[in-house]
Amino acid sequence: MAESRARAKAQDAGRISHSRSSDPSSSSRSLHGLLSGPKRFNELRLATGMCQSSLAKTLKELEEVGIAERKVHLDRPVAVEYRLSPKGLDLFEAIRDLERWAARWVMNSGPREVTQ
């Protein structure tokens, strides 16, 4: 069961990172930008440093795979807010675990010998 959930997370991450319209770093920046809570489009654009068109494409992709949610506020002016879905929060936890693993086993491992 846990293995199938991990496989599904990896497939979602793969769909996002191998998309034609965005690169993995833009998906990553968007995820990090949304981790602190819901943000309006321009807040997220400033937080990530992404251009408007790249951010719009990336958010659309994240929404299509169920990692981000979009909420329209019908105030004047109309505002659109983005947040991580429960699926997105779960994916982000998996990414954090991988970062911890890399910090422990890869980043601090020092020089490696090549074996034949």
Image (spheres, grey):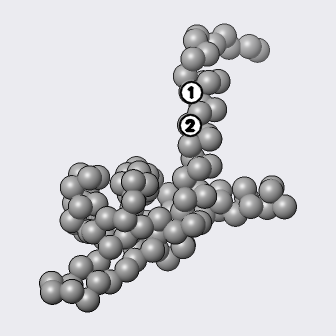
Q: Residue type at mark 1? A: Ala
For badge 2, the amino acid type reads Glu
* Residue 58 drawn above or below residue 64: above
Residue 50 vertical position relative to residue 71 in the rendered view, above or below: above
Q: Which residue is outermost to the right?
A: 1
Residue 14, visible in the rendered structure? no
What x and y, as percent, mark residue 70? 40, 77
- The answer for how far apart the CA atoms under marks 1 and 2 are is 6 Å
Q: Is residue 66 visible?
A: yes
Query: Does the CB distance between marks 1 and 2 fall below 8 Å?
Result: yes
- Dot 2 falls on a residue whose secondary structure is helix
- Label 1 element class: helix
In the displayed structure, would residue 101 be above or below residue 2?
above
For the point 21% across and 65% down, which residue is it?
Answer: 42
- Which image quarter holds the C terminus? top right
Q: Which residue is mark 2?
A: 99
Instruction: Using the image as rendered, state which of residue 23 and residue 103 is in the foreground.
Output: 103
Q: Position of residue 44 (x, y in %)?
A: 28, 60
Looking at the image, residue 31 sits to the left or right of residue 42; the answer is right
Q: Residue at x 80, y 56 (%)?
A: 2
Mark 1 is surrounded, within 10 Å at the Cα level, by few (under 14), some (14 to 19) or many (20 or more) other residues, namely few
Q: Quadrant of residue 34?
A: bottom left
Q: Which residue is mark 1?
A: 103
For the point 59% across and 56% down, the residue is 91
Quadrant of residue 15 in the image? Answer: bottom right
**Which of 98 and 113 lies nearest the eye of the viewer?**
98
The relative height of residue 113 versus residue 73 in the rendered view (above or below) is: above
Rendered location of residue 11, percent (x, y): 65, 62
Rendering quarter of residue 39: bottom left
Residue drawn 15% across the image and 84% down it: 77
Depth check: give the residue in front, 17 or 34. Answer: 34
Question: Residue at the left extreme?
Answer: 77
